[in-house]
């Protein structure tokens, strides 16, 4: 049995890693990711620099003592690159999940004779996703339309394409490994949510049927040899990994994870999703069904286990909180800007609305000094509408991620739902903790101590609840 586990969380702005031995974290290290470059709808970073930082972090965590190490990998979903097959040299930048260059391609597709509402509903029922420029398939199609020579190289096998997990594992395995995890493949718009495999019809629909794709593995439980002394035992999307930190909670939990983006994750029973995952599946109308669906699957004791989730999103919260730093330690007793509002999403308003975000996030009347607080109001209200729709019956909401250190957001959520209990994860690394848990579930061996939580006190600002109702009216009009 392998008793040393190396865990990597390859995030948007920072790469983090743990070394776990005997159920204890014996090293916690990080590397800064290359800076994102944004130009219009294009968001990219230096692919070679990113892979170099990831390899450097891995080597710092591995101990050269002759013992075998097992790697668990969590990655930002939908980020991808193309690289040269023989040398692993990147041929494109690392194209971020935040990139929306495929907007025009999607608009043209929707206006075409082969596309109709039934096609989009079928795509939704098969993938659990909406047709959005954030995902791998439409972005790759756009890149290849702009670079026909790149497509021919992919078809001929002299180049490869994959999400960040695929590119990194291929890189450290000297080109011998070409795999991806189920929950990462599930964010491409090419994978079938029910089977967890690539869907041939979808590949054809996006014009990618000739492009070789990585082999999809269960998120954990299938060991892949990378090189001497190192194997990979888990490949998980970052939000799914964060959710798995809650594995030992008695009831199926609801998690709000606030990092580069903010995400509300709630469990789905098989019965709730079974009707949707079929070629003839009917899709419910209304905003509730415009939440994303995610599948995590792993092998254990000779069988396969699955977890289905629905997910709400607020895009770009990390950047907003960094741009508008808070100076207040608590919500004021009275609203200094009762007619000021904010829609905090950057680029596109995420689930359940899926529409372009206003260029200026601020609406109504306010002063310059109100903007940091209005940003936090907007994040709290966007998360609140998700909790109302996909977690209305949950008695407890768990909060994790770097954003929970903000002095206003947790107490603002607790103020809006006085009937619910909100608990903060004291450990900021929910993704690494969840990754450690799924490795332990699938492989056995020592496990980390249970996470510690503390309850959040709601803000005494009664005006927040009244303003939330007016914010929803403003949001609908915008």
Image (tube, helix red, strand yellow):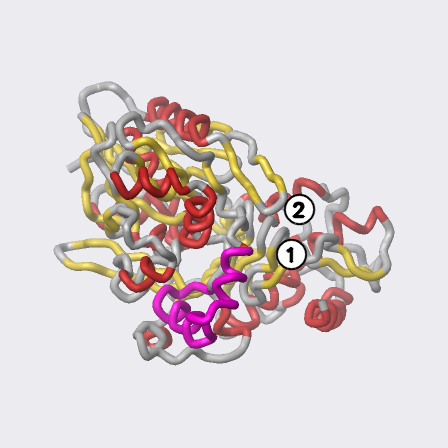
Q: Is residue 153 above or below residue 193?
A: above
| In front of the other: 465 or 189 | 189
Q: Which residue: 50% across, 60% down? A: 106
Image quadrant where one finds the C terminus: bottom right
- The magenta span reads 104-130
**Whether residue 398 is visible:** no
Q: Which residue position is annotated with label 2?
A: 320
Specify which label sits upstream in the sequence, 1 or 2: 2
Residue 1 as seen in the image, left or right of residue 178: left
| In front of the other: 239 or 141 | 141
* Circle on res. 61: none
The percent position of residue 229, horizontal first and vertical second, equals 19, 27
Q: Is residue 127 magenta?
A: yes
The percent position of residue 359, horizontal first and vertical second, equals 71, 53
**Whether residue 63 is visible:** yes
Disc 1, SS: helix
Q: Is residue 177 magenta?
A: no
Q: Which residue position is annotated with label 1?
A: 379
- Front disc: 1 or 2: 2
Q: Which residue: 44% across, 47% down? A: 145
Image quadrant where one finds the N terminus: top left
The percent position of residue 9, horizontal first and vertical second, equals 41, 39
- Number of numbered discs on residues: 2
Q: Which residue: 54% across, 63% down? A: 351
Disc 2, SS: helix
The percent position of residue 439, horizontal first and vertical second, equals 27, 45
The image quarter containing residue 154 is: top left
Whether the residues at callouts 1 and 2 have beta carbons within 8 Å, the answer is yes
Q: Which residue: 53% across, 46% down? A: 99
Residue 333 as seen in the image, left or right of residue 449: right
Q: Is residue 293 above or below residue 431?
A: below
Q: Main secondary structure of the magenta part?
A: helix
């Amino acid at each position: 049995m392998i008793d040393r586990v190396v865990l990597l969380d390859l995030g948007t702005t920072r790469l983090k890693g743990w070394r776990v031995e005997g159920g204890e974290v014996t090293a916690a290290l990080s590397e800064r990711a290359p800076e994102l470059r944004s130009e219009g709808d294009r968001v990219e970073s230096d692919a070679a620099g990113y892979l170099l930082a990831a390899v450097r972090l891995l080597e710092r965590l591995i101990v050269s003592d002759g013992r075998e190490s097992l790697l668990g990998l969590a990655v930002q979903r939908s980020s991808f690159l193309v690289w040269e097959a023989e040398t692993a040299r990147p041929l494109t930048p690392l194209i971020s999940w935040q990139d929306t260059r495929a907007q025009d391609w999607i608009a043209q597709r929707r206006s075409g004779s082969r596309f109709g509402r039934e096609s989009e509903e079928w795509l939704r029922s098969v993938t659990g996703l909406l047709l959005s420029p954030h995902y791998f398939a439409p972005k790759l199609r756009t890149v290849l339309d702009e670079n026909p020579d790149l497509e021919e190289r992919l078809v001929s096998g002299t180049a490869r394409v994959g999400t960040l997990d695929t590119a990194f594992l291929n890189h450290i395995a000297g080109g011998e490994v070409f795999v991806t995890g189920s929950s990462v493949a599930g964010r491409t718009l090419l994978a079938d949510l029910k089977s967890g495999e690539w869907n041939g019809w979808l590949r054809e629909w996006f014009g990618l049927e000739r492009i070789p794709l990585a082999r999809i593995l269960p998120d954990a439980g299938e060991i892949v040899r990378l090189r001497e002394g190192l194997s990979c035992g888990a490949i998980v999307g970052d939000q799914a990994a964060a959710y798995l930190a809650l594995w030992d909670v008695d009831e199926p939990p609801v998690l709000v994870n606030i990092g580069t983006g903010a995400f509300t994750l709630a469990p789905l029973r098989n019965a709730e999703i079974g009707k949707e995952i079929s070629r003839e599946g009917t899709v419910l109308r209304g905003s509730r069904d415009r939440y994303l669906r995610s599948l995590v699957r792993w092998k254990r004791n000779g069988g396969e286990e699955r977890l289905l989730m629905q997910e709400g999103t607020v895009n770009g919260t990390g950047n907003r909180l960094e741009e508008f730093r808070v100076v207040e330690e608590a919500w004021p007793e009275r609203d200094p800007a009762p007619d000021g509002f904010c829609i905090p999403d950057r680029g596109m308003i995420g689930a359940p609305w899926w529409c372009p975000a206003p260029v200026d996030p601020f609406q109504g009347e306010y002063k310059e000094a109100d903007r940091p607080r209005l940003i936090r109001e907007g994040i709290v209200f966007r998360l609140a509408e998700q909790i109302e729709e996909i977690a209305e019956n949950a008695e407890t909401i768990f909060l994790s991620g770097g954003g929970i250190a903000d002095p206003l957001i947790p107490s603002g959520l607790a103020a809006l739902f006085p009937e619910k209990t909100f608990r903060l994860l004291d450990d900021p690394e929910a993704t690494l903790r969840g990754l450690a848990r799924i490795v332990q579930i699938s492989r056995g061996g020592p496990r980390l101590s249970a996470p510690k939580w503390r309850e959040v006190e709601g803000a005494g600002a009664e005006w927040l609840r009244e303003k939330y109702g007016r914010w929803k009216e403003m949001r609908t009009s915008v």
